[in-house]
Amino acid sequence: MYDLGVVKTAIDRPDAESITALSQFGTATIHEAMGRVGLMRPYMRPVYQGAKLCGPAVTVLLQPSDNWMLHVAAEQLQAGDVVVAACTTESDAGFFGELLATSFRARGGVGLVIDGGVRDVSELEAMDFPVFAKTIHARGTVKETLGSVNVPVNCANATVHPGDVVVGDADGVVVVPRDRVAAVADASQARETKEAGVRERLAAGELGLDVYGMRDKLAAKGLEYQD
C-alpha cells in the first residue's frame, strides 16, 4: 500500500566524503563490490550519451501521467541531490523536461532517475543535466493527484529510500543504501585494485583460463580437448 499525500522534509544523507569516494567508480564495479545487488532494470538508460550522476536520493512517488509531485520535490532538494521518481503504476508519459531541470538545478539538484518518460532531450543534453529514464516520450502530463516525496519507492525493481545514493552511467543505475556508502566505496576500490593486476596479466598474453584458475573446474565438469 502506498503512502500518499506525504512530504517528509527531514532525511538522512551520507557524508559528502563517502559520496565523493563512491562517485569514482562505475555501476558495474559498485554492483559487484556490493554483492551483485542494487541494480535497476536494464531499460533504465541515460537519455543522452555521456550522462553520469551520483548523489543521495530525494524520492518521489508519482501518479500516472501526473508530474505534480516533481514540482513539490524541487523544494526539498539540497546541493548534490538526485531525484528518484517511481510511479504508482506503469506510465510512460513525459513527466520531466527542460523547465523542471532548470528548477532542479537552481535548487542544487544534479540529476534525475525516473521509471517513466521524459522529453526535451536535446535541451537536457545542452544543459548537461543527467537523466536516466525508462523511455523518451513527448506526451504531456497533468497536475491533479497527490503522490508523495521522500518515502520509500520501488524504481525499476530497486527499492530506494530517501538518502540512499544512486549512481548512473552508461551501464545503468545502481542503488547503494545510505548506511553502506563508505563500505561500498572501500570495497569498490579494492575490486579496482585487483582488476588492475588482472588487466596487466591479460595484456601480457595470459589467458583468463589461467589467471582465474579455471582449468581444474572445467576438467571436473568434463571438458575435453580433442585433436
Image: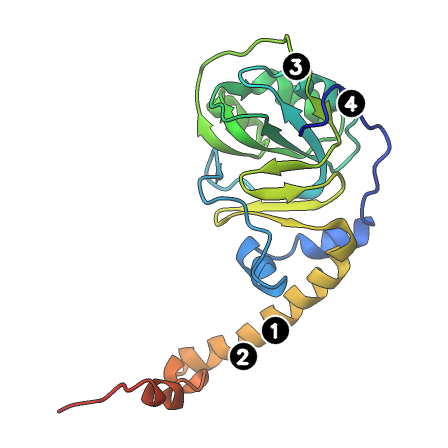
Spatial CA distance of label 2 from label 4 is 50 Å
Contact check, label 1 and label 4, Cβ < 8 Å: no
Spatial CA distance of label 1 from label 2 is 7 Å
Q: Position of residue 211 (x, y in %)?
A: 44, 84
Q: Position of residue 205 (x, y in %)?
A: 36, 83
Spatial CA distance of label 4 from label 3 is 13 Å
Which residue is denoted by mark 1 in the rendering? 193
Q: Which of marks 4 and 3 is nearer the N terminus?
A: 4
Q: How crowded is mark 3: few (under 14 residues within 10 Å), some or many (20 or more)?
A: some
Which residue is denoted by mark 4 in the rendering? 6
Identify whether 64 is placed above or below 181. Answer: above
Q: Earlier in the sequence, mark 1 or mark 4?
A: 4
Q: Which of marks 2 and 3 is nearer the N terminus?
A: 3
Q: How crowded is mark 4: few (under 14 residues within 10 Å), some or many (20 or more)?
A: few
Pick the front one: 215 or 110:
215
Pick out the residue farthest to the front.
1
Which residue is denoted by mark 2 in the rendering? 197
Secondary structure under tag 4 reads strand
Per the rendering, the mark at residue 183 is none
Q: What residue type is labelled 1?
A: Thr
Secondary structure under tag 2 reads helix
Contact check, label 2 and label 4, Cβ < 8 Å: no
